[in-house]
Structure formats: C-alpha cells, structure tokens
Image (cartoon, helix red, strand yellow):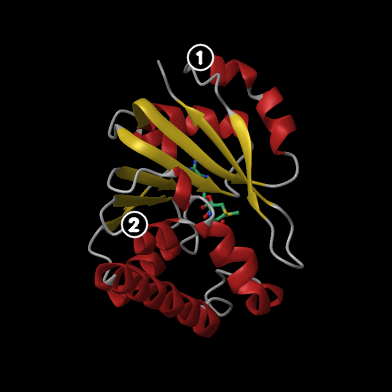
C-alpha cells in the first residue's frame, strides 16, 4: 500500500508540476494556444495519460514529435521504470523539454533533437507513442522502423482513427502490423472521445 501511495504521489506531483509549467510559460513560449489553458488537464494531460495502460511498464519507449511534452512527459512521469526518449525536431521545443525533465527530476527521460526518419536504425524500442504528429500512414512509415519486432505503435487519434487504419493498410502490412485496432480508451465530460490506436510490428 505504501509503495502504491508513493507511486501515485510522485507521478501525480510530477504531472501537476508539468501542468503548472505549461500554465505559466506555455503560451508565451508558443507551446500551447491561449484557449487550451483552461482545458489543459482534460484535453491534454488526461488525454495523454490514456496511452499508459497500453505501454510496457518497464520497456524502452520513444515519443515522436513530443512538442510541449505530450504524451512523452506524462508517460515518463507515470512509468518511472520505463526509459523514454522524446524525439522533436524543433530546437526551442527541445530546450523546453529538457527544462521540464530537469525540473520534474525525470531520470528516465531524455530528449533527442531531429526528425523521426533520422533515427531509423538507431532504436529498437518496445513502443513508440505519438499524438497529433501525422496521419497513420505517414506515422507508420516514421515509427515502425524505430520499433523492435513485437514492439507496438500506440497513437492518440481523433474521430478519424478507423478511417486512418484503412488508409494505412499498405504500411501496416509492410511491417506485419495487421492487428491495428482502435481502442476507445474513454471519455470525459465535455471532451471528445480519447481514441488510442495500437499496432504491433511483427516484421
Ligand atoms: C501538432 S504538434 C503535436 C505535439 C505534441 N505531440 C502534442 O500532442 O501536443 C506536432 C509535432 O511533431 C513534430 N514533428 C513534425 N515532423 C516530425 C518528424 N518528421 N519527426 C518527429 N517529429 C516531427 C513537430 O515539430 C511538432 O512538435
């Protein structure tokens, strides 16, 4: 019980600190729109947390196109046994991500600057996460080469998730990810359904 309390206490404290940093600096640093500030918890932080049940708790995870840190920072805070690499091409966003990691004391997270394609062959991750980065066919081409065989792509998507799976058939087949499916992870009042798509690389 003590360990459970310690886990939730520290994970929640880290996400709450991240919320505070985004509230204070997110708009001025061009990381989050002004209209999003009031719904940071629901639309962004809890939405990001929806991927966590579908990730290996102690594996290697790459978050593609982390931007302000979504979902990568939330994942690193909630899965302290996992190793999380945040890939982001924009320098000022990488600077922000490094500041967040330092402030939250996330020893299991690191930032790598660059585009996904530049890291092909550099990782054999257990999982790749992505939120609002690209449609699934493009995302698949970027993400599957970062995964080991048996690794999963876990993407946060919107209402078009099922259609995106249809459109991505070719790339999903190329990597043997024919198990691609929509997992409606849940809804919160006033928030669109949080849709998680998971696909496993088998070749
Ligand atoms: C719309 S933002 C989403 C950011 C964050 N994931 C979120 O949900 O708030 C898309 C991000 O993907 C990054 N990006 C664009 N092309 C990329 C690529 N080829 N590889 C990795 N990241 C990329 C952008 O720099 C940007 O930070």
Residue at 55% across / 42% down in the picture? 155
Vertical relation: 106 (above or below) 196: below
Secondary structure of the residue carrying numbered label 2 = loop
Q: In the visual, does 132 lie left or right of 14?
A: right
Q: In the visual, does 1 lie left or right of 23?
A: left
Q: Nearer the viewer, residue 71 or 150?
A: 150
Residue at 60% across / 16% down in the picture? 170
Picture quadrant of residue 60:
top left
Vertical relation: 111 (above or below) 202: below
Q: Nearer the viewer, residue 17 or 46?
A: 46
- Position of the C terminus, as image quadrant, is top left
What mark, if any, has residue 185 been given in the picture?
A: none
| Residue 108 seen | yes
Secondary structure of the residue carrying numbered label 1 = helix
Q: Which badge, 1 or 2, comes first in the chain's sequence?
A: 2
What mark, if any, has residue 79 been given in the picture?
A: 2
Task: Indicate the position of residue 167 as horizontal and vertical percent values.
Answer: 70, 24
Task: Classify mark 2: residues with Cα within 10 Å, few (<14), some (14-19) or many (20+).
Answer: many
Q: In the visual, does 172 lie left or right of 160?
A: left
Vertical relation: 180 (above or below) 37: above
Q: Residue furthest left?
A: 107
- In three-dimensional space, the C-alpha distance between marks 1 and 2, rounded to whole angstroms, equals 30 Å
What mark, if any, has residue 174 been given in the picture?
A: 1
């Amino acid at each position: 019980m003590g360990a459970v309390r310690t886990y939730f206490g520290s994970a929640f404290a880290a996400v709450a600190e991240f919320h505070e940093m985004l509230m204070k600096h997110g708009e001025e640093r061009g990381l989050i729109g002004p209209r999003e500030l009031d719904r940071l918890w629901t639309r962004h932080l809890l939405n990001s947390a929806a991927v966590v049940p579908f990730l290996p708790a102690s594996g290697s995870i790459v978050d593609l196109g982390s931007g302000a840190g979504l979902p990568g920072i939330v994942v690193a805070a909630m899965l302290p046994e996992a190793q999380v690499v945040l890939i982001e091409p924009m320098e000022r966003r990488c600077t922000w991500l490094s500041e967040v990691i330092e402030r939250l004391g996330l020893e299991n997270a690191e930032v790598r600057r660059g585009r996904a394609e530049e890291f092909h062959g550099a990782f054999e991750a257990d999982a790749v996460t992505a939120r609002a980065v690209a449609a699934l066919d493009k995302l698949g081409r970027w993400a599957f080469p970062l995964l080991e065989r048996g690794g999963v792509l876990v993407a946060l998507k919107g209402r078009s998730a099922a259609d995106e799976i249809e459109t991505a058939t070719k790339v999903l087949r190329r990597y043997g990810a024919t198990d691609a499916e929509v997992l409606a992870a849940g809804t919160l009042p006033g928030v669109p359904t949080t849709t998680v798509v998971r696909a496993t690389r088998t070749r």
